Amino acid sequence: MARKYDIRDIKLAPKGLVRIEWADRYMPVLRLIRERFARQKPLKGVNIAACLHVTTETANLVRTLQAGGARVAVCASNPLSTQDDNAAAMVKEFGVPVFAVKGEDHKTYYRHIHQALEIGPHITMDDGADLVSTLHQECQALAEHVMAGTEETTTGVIRLRAMAAHDALLFPVIAVNDSKTKHFFDNRYGTGQSTIDGVLRATNMLMAGATVVVAGYGWCGRGVAMRAHGMGARVIVTEVDPVKAIEAAMDGFMVMPMSKAAPLGDLFITLTGNIRVLRLEHFRKMKDGAIVCNAGHFNVEIDIPALEKAASDKRALRPNVMEYQLGKKRVCLLADGRLVNLSAAEGHPAMVMDMSFANQALAAEWVVRNHDKLERRVYTVPAEIDAEIARLKLKSMGFAIDKLNPEQKKYLASWEMGT
Ligand SMILES: NC(=O)c1ccc[n+]([C@@H]2O[C@H](COP(=O)([O-])OP(=O)(O)OC[C@H]3O[C@@H](n4cnc5c(N)ncnc54)[C@H](O)[C@@H]3O)[C@@H](O)[C@H]2O)c1
């Protein structure tokens, strides 16, 4: 058991352990990496401070890093995404110092980040860049020993690129999110499925025949729109990028500004990574009983302060459902506007996190081998690692594919032959 930790209740460990084992069944690529790491110890002597959603999949990533020889301290990357039973098992069964309690307040959230940083990281592992930004703003001295960081999500990569552009980044960071084997699958199929899962667990609403407004048609938005459509919903997409908007239209969805979509939707889901996408002017136009939620990284996509201020009353109707009275109408906010898939459900299925976390583990190994050659900027995971993860995943799924023969290789490398 870890000596220092801060979790809900250590007695929850047995329940967490079976859930970690269940997730592990669906993480064959990470398991292969763990077996190799146990033999080769590529992370021997490396301290890692990880600020990730404290889920069962994260537990399996941490076990993999430990098998490689690393010491890992973990805090939450979102106050509502921690699975308390899983956190207990990480402490008790795997000796991980975990600092995370589901529902922790803002102050505790940042105290936990500081506690994870006390490990003295050689590698930072972030999901949304709160750990890196805290380190840069409040304990810069730690940066001296950091070889590099890794970043899991789109919003974090955007923040880190902004830091690099302002010459504020004190060490290199690997944008794990930008691997094809990450965002093609995790953001699209993972968020697609688990966001709907979160909405259904919170509300038990019927998707068939409902009008679902998806704000943002990026990797996550595409996944959610696709899955909502598959369940019989009418999907409306709102966008600010004309190319993405054309794509949504050609995928068969209605496209319009939020001001026009607001009176039509039964359910609104924001996935833009942007601020105040749903505002008071929209809430006022919505149908009575409209449901609003967010699956983007931060809870700023829905203007909750404005909703709180304008509402004459509010009441909790079910876990994760808060109803606001706006004049004669009611608007229901799910999971305090936090990532609904992680707050009201369990986050992405392990099958998809297998690839995301294989990228994290192999990125950490690559950092140890290459950090002395890296500059203070944002890197992507090398293409060979991305391709290797794809090969292993495909094999684990029981699929095989063709290989280019010499004639095809030559043809693809030439320009002379035409019609
Ligand atoms: N819930 C999860 O588990 C999960 C998983 C992965 C990523 N994320 C987060 O989800 C968010 C989206 O990630 P992504 O990979 O899809 O990013 P993305 O960049 O691929 O897509 C975001 C889209 O939102 C659009 N957009 C921006 N402002 C908008 C506005 N005001 N109105 C409508 N559309 C707008 C952009 O044009 C873009 O197409 C990020 O915050 C990311 O960190 C969440």
Image: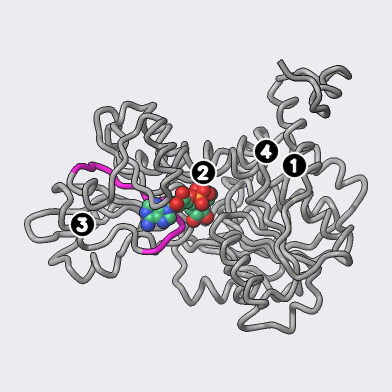
Whether ligand 1 has any atom under 8 Å from the Cβ at mark 2 is answered as yes
Identity of the residue drawn at 88% across and 64% down: 373
- Amino acid identity at mark 3: Phe
**Residue linked to disc 2:** 219
**Residue linked to disc 3:** 283
- Magenta residues span 264-275
Q: Name the front one of labels 3 and 2.
A: 2
| 48 or 269: nearer the viewer | 269
Q: Is residue 230 above or below residue 266?
A: above
Q: Name the front one of labels 2 and 4.
A: 2
Question: Dividing the image into 4 quarters, which one contains the C terminus?
Answer: top right
Q: Position of residue 310 (x, y in %)?
A: 17, 68
Task: Using a 10 Å C-alpha cutoff, classify the residue at mark 1 as few (fewer than 14 neighbours), some (14 to 19) or many (20 or more).
Answer: many
**Residue linked to disc 1:** 386
Mark toward the start of the polypeptide (2 vs 4):
4
**Residue linked to disc 4:** 24
- Amino acid identity at mark 2: Trp
Distance from the alpha carbon under mark 2 to that under mark 4 = 25 Å
Q: Main secondary structure of the magenta part?
A: loop
| 129 or 68: nearer the viewer | 129
Q: Is residue 66 above or below residue 26?
A: below
Q: Is residue 170 above or below residue 349?
A: below
Answer whether residue 320 is visible to the viewer in this image: no
| 101 or 46: nearer the viewer | 46
Mark toward the start of the polypeptide (1 vs 3):
3
Q: Position of residue 235 (x, y in %)?
A: 32, 35
Answer whether residue 208 is visible to the viewer in this image: yes
Mark toward the start of the polypeptide (4 vs 3):
4
Task: Using a 10 Å C-alpha cutoff, classify the residue at mark 3 as few (fewer than 14 neighbours), some (14 to 19) or many (20 or more).
Answer: many
Question: Dividing the image into 4 quarters, which one contains the N terminus?
Answer: bottom right
Mark toward the start of the polypeptide (3 vs 2):
2
